[in-house]
Image: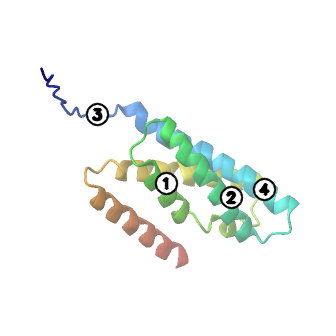
Amino acid sequence: MAKVITDTQQVIARSWWQSGETAFLGILIGVCWWVLYMLLNTYTPMIPDIAGTVSHVLVAVLGVSGLVRLFAARPLLIAIASATTLWGLGGFVDGLVWYETLLWSALLFGLAYALFGAVAHIRSLWVSLAVAVTIVVVANILLLI
């Protein structure tokens, strides 16, 4: 005798504080980026842009693992889009006082994680990717002007 098992798909809506968790994780990632950037910029003979790039790669891995633990939708999209949007941050904050650099990195990473966290909740994967790529391209063009 065969046993029939039916599987129903359930849609689980995120509560308001879970969106705040993604933004708070972005702030923590920004602080981690600042620590790595300051360490690399102080103790290695690197150009600030290179120190920022290495820091971005390392915190993107931390961001993905943190987003997975928060059960965020499409954690790779959020972490990679945030890192590519803020890729030139090391050159922008070069020459600022340490607390200004910390403030800007935490603020910008928090905003980027919140923005791309909202984009990641678009139902269609392809639309979500297209919107994220458009935001990254427009942001990088605006930062070059």
Q: CA distance from mark 1 to mark 3?
A: 22 Å
Q: Nearer the viewer, mark 2 or mark 1?
A: 2
Within the image, what quadrant is residue 4 found in? top left
Cα–Cα gap, marks 1 and 4: 21 Å
| Tag 4: amino acid | Met
Which residue does the numbered mark 2 point to in the structure image? 55
Residue 138 left/right relative to 99? left
Labels 4, 2: front one: 2
Between marks 2 and 3, how big is the CA–CA gap?
Answer: 34 Å
Q: Image point 24% across, 34% down: which residue?
A: 11
| Residue under the point 69% across and 62% down | 54
Where is residue 16, by image quadrant?
top left
Q: Vertical placement of 56 versus 18: above or below?
A: below
Sooner in the amino-acid sequence: mark 2 or mark 1 = 2
Amino acid at the residue labelled 1: Ala
Is residue 105 depicted above or below 49 in this figure? above
Amino acid at circle 2: Ser
Cα–Cα gap, marks 4 and 3 = 39 Å
Residue 26 percent coordinates (x, y): 55, 46
Question: Which numbered disc, 2 or 3, marks the residue that appears first in the sequence?
Answer: 3
Q: In the rendering, which numbered label is found on residue 38?
A: 4
Q: Which mark is residue 13?
A: 3
Q: What is the distance, in whole Å, between disc 4 and disc 2 at their CAs?
A: 9 Å
Q: Position of residue 141 (x, y in %)?
A: 47, 76
Confirm or deny contact between disc 4 and disc 2 (CB under 8 A). no
Q: Which residue is mark 1?
A: 112
User: How busy is the neighbourhood of tag 2: few (under 14 within 10 Å), some, or many (20 plus)?
Assistant: many
Query: Could you say whether the residue bearing mark 2 is in a helix, strand or loop?
Result: helix
Q: Quadrant of the N terminus?
A: top left
